[in-house]
Image (cartoon, coloured by chain):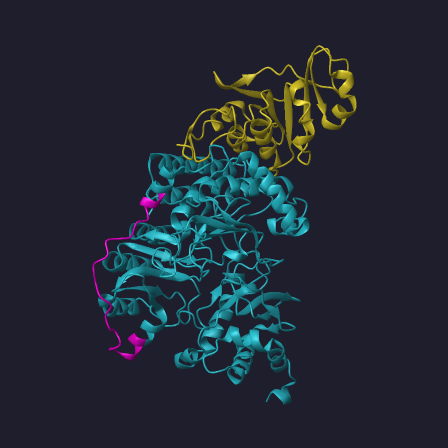
Amino acid sequence: MYRYDPIDQALVDQRVAQFRDQTRRFLAGELTEDEFKPLRLRNGLYMQRHAPMLRIAIPYGLLSSHQLRTLASVARRYDRGFGHFTTRQNLQLNWPKLEDVPDILAELAGVEMHAMQTSGNCVRNVTADHLAGVAADEIEDPRPWCEIVRQWSTLHPEFSYLPRKFKIAVTGAPADRAASEVHDIGLHLKRDAIGALGFEVLVGGGLGRTPIIGKVIRELLPPQHLLSYLEAVLRIYNEEGRRDNLNKARIKILVKSLGIDEFRRRVEAEWERIRDSALELNWREIERMRSFFTPPPYEALADVDVAAGDVRFMAWYRYNTRAHKVPGYRVVFLSLKAHGEAPGDMTCEQMSAVADLADRYSFGQVRATHDQNLLLADVRQNDLQELWRALDRERLATPNIGTLTDMICCPGLDFCSLANAGSIPVAKQIHAHFDDLDYLYDLGEIQIKMSGCMNACGHHHVGHIGILGVDKHGEEWYQITLGGSASEQAALGEVIGPSVPQAEVAATLQKIIDVYVEHRFEEERFIDTVRRIGVDPFRERVYAPAHQAA
Amino acid sequence: MRQLIRQRESAGPALAEDEWRSIEDDPTGSSRALIFPLARWQSERERWWLWAGRLGVRIAPADRVETLEHDLRRLALVAIEFTGPSEGRGYSQARVLRDRFRFGGEIRAVGYVKLDQLFFLSRCGVDAFELAEGIDAQRALAALKQFDVAYQPGAVNSPPMRHRVSQ
């Protein structure tokens, strides 16, 4: 993984000193609340319902065991002993004290971490495919390019006061595991007919109030021009994006109002002016970045037959592990969706344990996924039984990856001051209702994504089943969408009808699942059935008068 | 009178005398250095073009720098106005002036100009800072030196600094 050099370290240290001074000025009354807000936000600090929330950057989801141990110790000392992994591969602490935040940041800087640009109207932490470097379908490892983008965007002097937040995701495989089509910019590494590398560039995707799938602005950008092209897009956005209405300020609204062709024309005109500048990446720099992401020292192993073993192990193997491109190895997911827990939450004891397991079984590295789970990317197949037992002890082996209870979920009304409704209680309700694993396995792959308000941090628009919390005269109600997808050929879900009260969410899902089971062909996935038969049969069942539904 | 900091290539940032006046305050041009709001400049340009003094124009966030393209050779100063803590168009205006039009005169940030913007402004090519009321000049000078590293190349003529991209 990437290691800081003296320039990186100096920059992070100086940023900590700057934030310490900003916090001091705020606490001394020299900065008003309104003035401090954009300053703290661009350093990941929100003022939430109960306490500040600090969002720590995990660039493209990659953590060393040493960093994870530090996160555990920070969560123990400054918080209530747990953290929450987000859909953008970051970690949130929900209970730090404002006056402690500079010290937390200083500790993080000691292990090459920070909280820069995890919120605020700036370029956010860049995200990537969590299977980068180990997926068999990979064309090119996205991580060196993520690091190049991370550095370019960090404290960018021109783009630190954008109209609104700006999110970039990078993938290097045909399968999109980073929801890149619903990002402000999605970058897809591809090769042309002669094998030359380039980026397909998508722009203007996003969720929130106005969900839109990104549009292709350039088919294949030569990689040495990545930064000048990004700079051209951002400059047009910074100059022309709306600043009069917060809800219309994202780049997707600008792209939509100009049309992709006119937006492209403006970007390309600007790019022509700046492409041959100091922003052009030279191959030495690209190779330097690549050298940080070379494969770990794999042993020469053969694939082993792990089919023997206890039933629980076999379920875990089937659902929580994935193929690895190197023989004898396996990718292992750690489920942060245990029954009764808030999705994405992890205790500091679990973090410490996972750090040890990463050292022992996976070259000392851990990854956060955009589905709010963790992943050990390089586990020897021979170690799987042992690793499973250890994860099981830590309650990190719930064999539900990809199933209905592997829900994406925002913190909701329990923590977030923007939320209209709770998410965590609903996640728990769904977990309790669908607690039969065999039944879940029979249902197969179903993605439920849930947000406590229309800001869509839980990505409900792109859930196979999306759940959106709404406030109805002071009560928490939930609107349900079907047919969304964040994968390649991303799609937005369709609302099935009026929202349902909190107590009826799981029962409503049961009706939806029943319709699926009745209509599916043998191995047909839920999403494929929805695409084939449309939402009407589901709608009819959910809203049928009670005497008919019985 | 607001305090002015100027950043000069040779000497670094320092407090400076402001010899410029706005046309509203000095309609006869006795200061020999006049700043016009953009609209007024556009309507009175011909009248002042051959005037003996120095000329400057003040632009608002929504103004496009391109409208000044053919005037820049006559201008010694462009003042970029900041209207609040989240206004960010001025950073791009400065970059375009320096990098695209190679403007070599003074670029001055005016209006809502406070400590935490100064470093970014300087990297974008702003070389004069008219501080908002109540901002301590010594702390402003310190804020300009908060970082001695950057990941991005700075604007043309911005102060040199260790940076990475073009290594």
Q: Is residue A126 above or below residue A224?
A: below
Spot the residue most to the front: A194
Is A294 magenta? The answer is yes
Q: In this picture, is A334 found above or below A46? A: below
Q: Residue at x 66, y 51 (%)?
A: A259
Name the spot of residue A151 as percent of width and height, x first: 43, 41
Quadrant of the image containing the N terminus of chain B: top right
- The answer to which quarter of the image holds residue B41 is top right
Query: Is residue A1 visible in the rendered structure shown here?
Result: yes
Q: Viewer-proximal residue, A241 or A476?
A: A241
Measuring 60% from the left and 39% from the top, which residue is drawn there? A269
Q: Does residue A391 appear to the left or right of B127 in the view shown?
A: left
Q: Position of residue A52 (x, y in %)?
A: 49, 50
The number of numbered badges drawn on the structure is 0
Q: Considering the whole magenta stretch, tell me its main secondary structure.
A: loop
Which residues make up the magenta segment? A289-314
Chain A is which colour? cyan
Quadrant in the picture for the C terminus of chain B: top left
Q: Is residue A153 above or below residue B126?
A: below
**Near-viewer residue (B62 or A328):** A328
Q: Residue at x 47, y 16 (%)?
A: B10
- Residue A83 drawn at (x, y percent): 40, 57
Q: Can residue A477 be seen here? A: no
Question: Measured from the top left, where is residue A234 in percent x and y?
Answer: 56, 42
Q: Is residue A160 magenta?
A: no
Which residue is pictured at 50% across the width and 43% down the height? A40
Q: Colour of chain B?
A: yellow
**Of all residues shown, which one is farthest toward the left?**
A300
